[in-house]
Amino acid sequence: MQRTLTAMALALASAAATTASAEDKIVVEFAYPYSHLFDVTYEAILPKFYAAHPNIEIRMRATYESYEDGTNTILREAVAGTLPDVTMQGLNRQAILVEKGIAKSLEPFIAAEADFAKDGYHKAMLDLGTFDSEVHGLPFSISLPVGYYNMEVMAKAGYDATNLPTTWAEVIEACGKLREAGVDNPMFWGWNITGNWFLQALMWSQDKPTVMGTDFTLDEPEGLTALNTMKDIFTGCEMQNLEWKAALASFSAGDLGMMYWSTSAVGAVERAMGDFTLVTSEYPGLTADGPMGLPAGGNSAMLVSTSEDPEELAAAWAWLKFITSGEGAADVARTTGYMPPNQAANEIILADFYDANPAKATAVRQLPLLREWQAYPGDNGLAATQVIYDGIEGIVTGEFEDMTELQEELTEEVQELLE
Amino acid sequence: MAEVTYAGAPEGAKAQGFRFNTRAAVVHAVLIVGALIVLLPFYTMLSLSLKSPSEIMQQTGGFMGAQEPFRDDFCVKLGGTEEECMVNPIVYNYTTAFEKAPLVRYLLNGLIVTISIFVIQVIVALPCAYALAKLRFWGREAVFSLVLFCLLIPVHAIALPLYIMLAQVGLTNTYAALIIPWTISVFGIFLMRQFFMTVPDDLIDAARMDGMSEYGIIWRVMLPTAIPALMAFGIFSIVAHWNDYFWPRIVITGNRDLFTPPLGLREFKGDADGDNFGPMMATACIIVTPLIVAFLLAQRRFIEGITLSGMK
């Protein structure tokens, strides 16, 4: 703690010394998605940032309504020449901005930092924003899939915090017991989260990326295991085909016993839930050892400034670094269900916080499993996402019975889109 | 058509001493079901704008909710104590709508944009419609066909070229970007032309004999006769641009101060992590209120205008 603070103070002092002579404030234009989730985070960070950098002004732009809208907006602004300086982009939407040369490499700025690793930037985190072996994005808020449990409902089938299911087979078994105990709708599994996140979760659980280069790996044995696991979960639990809002609403209302979802919704669920005990626990695995990896969700800060002025770029970098390390990063966890991927922030600044907020601590325990949320390469990436989405929906609704057949169909269709 | 049923039914009922009329009863039953279908979303909107987040998510509390104070977590996170942060649902939803999305500013923007669009549309459409309806010139029918053709082009098809043009002259993120693309309304030209066709030529000939210029005729003779049609067009134009989410969202990416009211809704989006429905629906209620009031006030003129201009 002491050392981080000293390092921060030094960095700030030197930054202040170089720019204090400037009469006017340097303006950094900044845009981010999901007002409702992150306004409060930036409101908490800004006073601290201004105290440290009195000569920089952060000008908040119109927020993006979703990650897809964020990417679209940046692509449009690149044409119009009205790009902001720093933008927050969905982790699986960074690649396109790098390919098109809109996002700038952060390597020159990192090279100029003395204590970069000590500020808590570790490799797994940097990997999420690394393209062509150069860092282009620094992750800001990270989510991982976790299990949400309504302990009062779970108790009906004899479960407590010590024996929650740790494998999907146990989840299915729990569904059976809950049904016997009179729970109509025991479980929801968030297959419909954007970007085929949960399919990638089952693939990474077997330590298998879903895309390698332009090769869609669903045709391999791990793909079949993933599809079969989904089918077992959906049919074994007789899972209803709920959309996002309905799923969160059912869990909040206390109807569901188990929900597998992103940790980022912990805040929203705590605000909206009825009178029951919420416990989150590790995402189950295919074997008793748990998952071997899990895809990271969330967003990442990218430098898209078109400015040539080194002072302006330095100011943009100062902001980018502030929100992804130290107190700035810690505020992500304090104000949302996300966690900062920054080691120093999680282990030192936030240690007490996680003791007091055990529901948010599950994802932090899973941090070593952090893997990339993969984008499907090429211009048909979004179409590929939709094809897979439709395929999985077909498993939920019972339209597809034979997983080997579905595996072939999906592989063929998606592979065609990626080439 | 609607007017005939409306005005006719009660009179007939009176004359026949409240005799049961199967046809009228069926008509009313169908209309009531239709009205319920239309009103249901408004009911939900109003109801959600009054309830607390937990009541909304758990679908409890009926129409009003219990109105018990709840804890505003964002206030706590920003350092407020628990006591300070207990809020009443209605007060929370509506104050958040005005504070977090600066709705007054957005409403003002909406007013500036819709009124500017309408005024310019009228300035362009009236002379065009007059020429197409009353002046004889070579190629008139061809020009009118073009007007009809333009009615078939959806804005989404030309949004990208429009955006690029505005970007090249540096007009994105300005009021101009919100207004300019809509200033020429082919629908307005078409509607006014249909109306002008019904105005007798004698009126115009008399004005010409009195020595009025063509522009004089447009603004001092045709405009006053066209008020009902303009009202109808005004409602179409203002409703469309007041409610427009698509275009403002495309051109306003910089300064939040230029947002029009519907963009205020996005301040409460969280998707998979939970939306903030209370303030979102409060915002929606505030946005539609001026429109509903305006429509109720202008209802009669609106129906007249539609009937008169031959848009039946």
Image (cartoon, coloured by chain):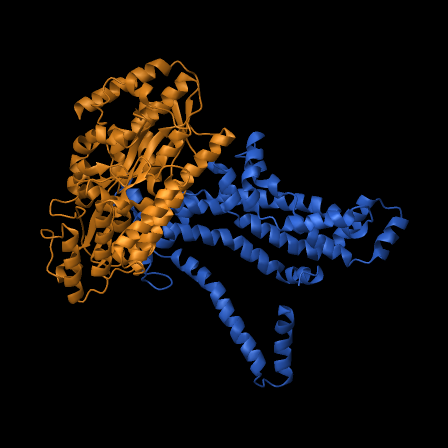
Q: Nearer the viewer, residue A11 or B77?
A: A11
Above or below residue A388? Residue A21 is: above
Residue found 39% across the figure and 37% down from its top: A378
Where is B106 relative to A349, above or below? below
Find residue B108 and report its image quarter. Answer: top right
In the image, B137 versus B167, the foreground residue is B137
Give the chain letter for orange.
Answer: A
- Residue A233 in the image, given as x and y percentages of width and height: 21, 56
Tell which residue pokes out farthest to the right in this image: B209
Residue B265's x, y, as percent? 44, 47
Whether residue B271 can be seen here: no
Left or right of A20 on screen, residue A183 = left
Quadrant position of residue B45: bottom left
Q: Colour of chain B?
A: blue
Query: In x, y percent, where is residue B72?
Result: 30, 47
Q: Position of residue A142 (x, y in %)?
A: 27, 38
Residue in the image at 69% along x and 47% along y: B122
Instruction: Pick the residue in front: B137 or B24.
Output: B137
Of A396 and A1, nearer the camera is A396
Q: Residue at the location (46% across, 60% down)?
A: B42
Q: Is residue A68 visible?
A: yes
Which image quadrant: the C terminus of chain B?
bottom right
Q: Quadrant of the N terminus of chain B?
A: bottom right
Number of marks in picture = 0
